[in-house]
Structure formats: structure tokens, C-alpha cells
Amino acid sequence: MEINKSMKKLLLAEEVFLFLSSIILFGLAVEYSWWFFALLFFLPDISFLGYLINTNTGAWFYNTLHHRGIMIAFTLAGYFLDVPILLAVGIIFFSHASFDRIFGYGLKYPDSFHHTHLGNIGK
């Protein structure tokens, strides 16, 4: 199923909004410095190591570390339990997931790294 161009633009605008909102939230809600944000921003991509085992394992690790619902849960837990590191990690990983989706990297199906909920990536 091909997504039409206007829908792609709408989804892209949504992801950009979520990405920028998470950056603003980090600046307002946590007292960690921006170097901490930069240090952890690409940490969810360690999930690619799961693909060294097989595509099913890789997809599971990737989806777990890029699932925005999980990151919202971390963020809320960090806020309500007053655990600043959990709040920061939730916001940063949420930001990363939105950043990935801006470039078309969606949640993975277990059959192939290139098969995502946003369509196929790459060639």
C-alpha cells in the first residue's frame, strides 16, 4: 500500500513537531545539560546489534527501544516517581524515535530490517 504525497507530508510534519516538542520538553523539564542529550541521543541504535542474531531478534530490540509508548511511560514514571534520569532518558529516546521516523525509519517487521510500518526503506 503506497501512501500518497499529501499524507507523507502530513506524517513528516507530525514527526518534526514531535521531535521539536521533545527537545523543548528536555530543556524545560530536566536539569541535565545538552551534552547529556547528545550523548544519549543515538543510544537506541545499539538495538541494531540484535540483527547480528537474526531479523526477528533485531526487530524486537529495535522496536522496544524505538517505541514511543514505552518512552512516554518512562517519561511519566520519571516525572511522577521523581527519578530525573528516567525522565531524561524517556524524553531523549522519544526524541530519537521521532528523528528516525522523519527519515522513514519506522518500527520493524521481523522479516527484514527494511520492512517497516512506514513502508520499505532503502532501494
Image (tube, grey):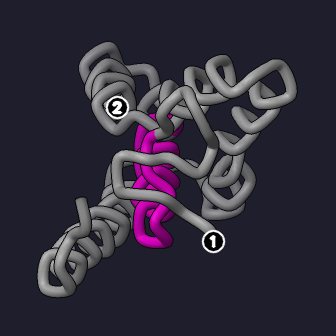
Q: Relative to residue 30, is residue 123 drawn left or right?
A: right
Q: Position of residue 16 (x, y in %)?
A: 32, 74
Q: Quadrant of residue 73?
A: top left
Q: Quadrant of residue 48?
A: top right
Residue positioned 61% across, 63% down in the render:
34
Report how many numbered discs are placed on residues in the image: 2
Q: Quadrant of residue 98?
A: bottom left
Q: Is residue 75 magenta?
A: no
Task: Name which of mark 2 and mark 1 comes first in the sequence.
Answer: 2
Q: Residue furthest top?
A: 81
Residue positioned 76% across, 22% down in the render:
54
How many neighbours does mark 2 have within 10 angstroms: few (below 14), some (14-19), or many (20 or more)? many
* Quadrant position of the N terminus in the picture: bottom left
Say what amino acid the circle numbered 2 marks: Thr
Instruction: Find the magenta span and give its range.
Output: 89-107
Query: Along the line of sight, which residue is nearer the eye, 72 or 27?
Result: 72
Above or below residue 36? Residue 53 is: above
Query: Along the line of sight, which residue is nearer the eye, 78 or 52?
Result: 52
Query: Along the line of sight, which residue is nearer the eye, 29 or 19?
Result: 19
Mark 1 falls on what kind of element?
Answer: loop
Mark 2 falls on what kind of element?
Answer: helix
Residue positioned 13% across, 85% down in the render:
6
Q: Relative to residue 52, is residue 4 drawn left or right?
A: left
Say what amino acid the circle numbered 1 marks: Lys
Residue 75 - label: 2
Q: Relative to residue 5, is residue 93 drawn left or right?
A: right
Q: Where does label 1 land, which residue?
A: 123
Q: CA distance from mark 2 to mark 1?
A: 35 Å
Q: Position of residue 17 (x, y in %)?
A: 24, 72
Above or below residue 101? Residue 58 is: above
* Quadrant position of the C terminus in the picture: bottom right
